[in-house]
Image: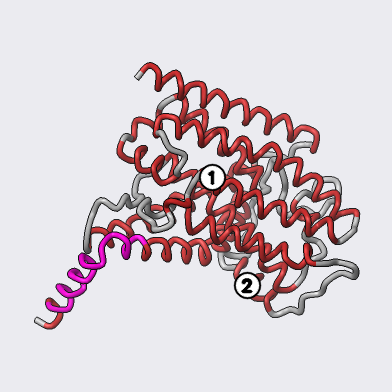
């Protein structure tokens, strides 16, 4: 009787708290999942590559071991650096946390849903990249300047493509709010098979690879001066600062893969239609769906990297320009379909 009474009280408490409390719980779980799971996703992708290349691999937990080791070391600032160098890791990690909180990865009923606007999320991602580029420039080294220049070049091609590709999905939704787009796609799954969605999915997948510095745009494991983009900007960082940068890079990859899954494979995302214990169960299903979809997309990306080589630097703009063209075609197809409807 005591157990039944406590269960009834907890259910009544959830019903009394309303959807806002459940949405807050979902947002907290979403952030915790990104914070804890981002290094695990990186470790899983490295393990997949190792197995496909015939190596044993260091294990899925190795990125967390690396972060723990870096956190124990003393940070060393290069001579002559100022506040851009010191603030870059904090800005990069902070923007990754904010994006992880507002993007609809687990639920569309988050209290922060009003901030999940396409333009705001894209601006936050760009802010983190610009901060890291300024940190690389502040070192005054050849590698830092070279990496920052290359990063800004990629950024100038990536951010418009993200805007245009997701805008193609927002045409029929009538809103640039990401939660609204995900909710409508989940209510009408056939939207995923439309030409506009397929073109936007390919474009967004290409810019996700570029934004997170993966092959064929960048190689996260290289230290060759002719091929480095992201790594060239962080060569002067050490200790906790480097740990923040490494975690933030993994978090951005996790969030972008999760967003890709939510936009084009929205099944499992909680929409806030249930109440009480049903809403809590929907949130837990959303957590499991997000983890599963992100892990599968990460493994597919890692498997693809085994069979691809890094592009020459001067070929990267051609690839990104092609992705932008696909995004434009997706917008055109969205307007044609909306006009026909």
Is 205 situated above or below 221?
above
Q: Nearer the viewer, residue 28 or 290?
A: 28
Rendering coords of residue 107 (x, y %): 37, 53
Q: Earlier in the sequence, mark 2 or mark 1?
A: 2
Residue 211 disc label: none
Position of the N terminus by quadrant: bottom left
Is 5 situated above or below 264?
below
* Residue at the (36%, 65%) spot, across then down: 25
**View extreme (front): residue:** 114
Position of the C terminus by quadrant: top left
Within 10 Å of the Cα at label 1, are there few (<14), some (14-19), or many (20+) other Cα atoms?
A: few
Residue 65 disc label: 2
* Residue at the (47%, 66%) spot, across then down: 32
Q: What residue range appears in magenta?
A: 5-23
Rendering coords of residue 26 (x, y %): 37, 61
Cα separation between marks 2 and 1 = 24 Å
User: Mainly helix, strand or loop, the magenta region?
Assistant: helix
Within 10 Å of the Cα at label 2, are there few (<14), some (14-19), or many (20+) other Cα atoms?
A: few
84 sits to left or right of 57:
right
Rendering coords of residue 157 (x, y %): 69, 36
Rendering coords of residue 67 (x, y %): 65, 71
**View extreme (top): residue:** 340
Counting the numbered discs, the total is 2
What SS does tag 2 mark? helix
64 sits to left or right of 173:
right
Q: Label 1, on which residue?
A: 300
Please tell me in which quadrant of the rendered image residue 177 appears.
top left
155 sits to left or right of 56:
right
């Amino acid at each position: 009787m005591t157990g039944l009474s406590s269960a009834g009280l907890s259910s009544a408490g959830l019903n009394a708290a309303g959807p806002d409390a459940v949405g807050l719980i979902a947002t907290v779980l979403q952030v915790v999942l990104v914070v804890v799971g981002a290094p695990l996703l990186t470790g899983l992708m490295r393990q997949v590559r190792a197995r496909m290349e015939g190596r044993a691999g260091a294990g899925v937990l190795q990125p967390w071991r690396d972060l723990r080791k870096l956190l124990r070391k003393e940070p060393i600032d290069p001579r002559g650096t100022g506040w851009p160098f010191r603030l870059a890791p904090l800005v990069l990690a902070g923007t990754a946390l904010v994006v992880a909180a507002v993007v609809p990865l687990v639920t569309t009923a988050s209290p922060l849903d009003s901030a999940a606007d396409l333009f705001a999320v894209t601006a936050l991602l760009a802010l983190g990249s610009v901060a890291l580029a300024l940190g690389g420039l502040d070192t005054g080294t050849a590698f830092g300047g070279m990496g920052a220049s290359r990063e800004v070049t990629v950024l100038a091609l990536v951010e418009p493509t993200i805007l245009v590709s997701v805008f193609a999905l927002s045409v029929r939704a009538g809103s640039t709010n990401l939660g609204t787009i995900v909710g409508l796609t989940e209510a009408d799954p056939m939207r995923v098979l439309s030409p506009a969605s397929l073109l936007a999915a390919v474009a967004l997948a290409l810019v996700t690879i570029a934004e997170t510095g993966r092959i064929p745009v960048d190689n996260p494991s290289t230290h060759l001066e002719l091929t480095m983009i992201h790594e060239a900007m962080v060569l002067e960082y050490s200790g906790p600062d480097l740990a923040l940068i490494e975690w933030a890079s993994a978090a951005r990859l996790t969030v972008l893969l999760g967003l890709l899954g939510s936009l084009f494979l929205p099944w499992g995302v909680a929409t806030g239609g249930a109440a009480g214990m049903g809403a809590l169960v929907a949130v837990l299903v959303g957590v499991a769906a997000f983890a599963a979809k992100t892990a599968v997309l990460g493994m597919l990306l890692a498997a693809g990297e085994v069979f691809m080589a890094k592009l020459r630097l001067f070929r990267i703009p051609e690839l990104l320009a092609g992705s932008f063209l696909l995004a434009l075609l997706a917008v055109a197809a969205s307007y044609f379909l909306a006009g026909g409807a």
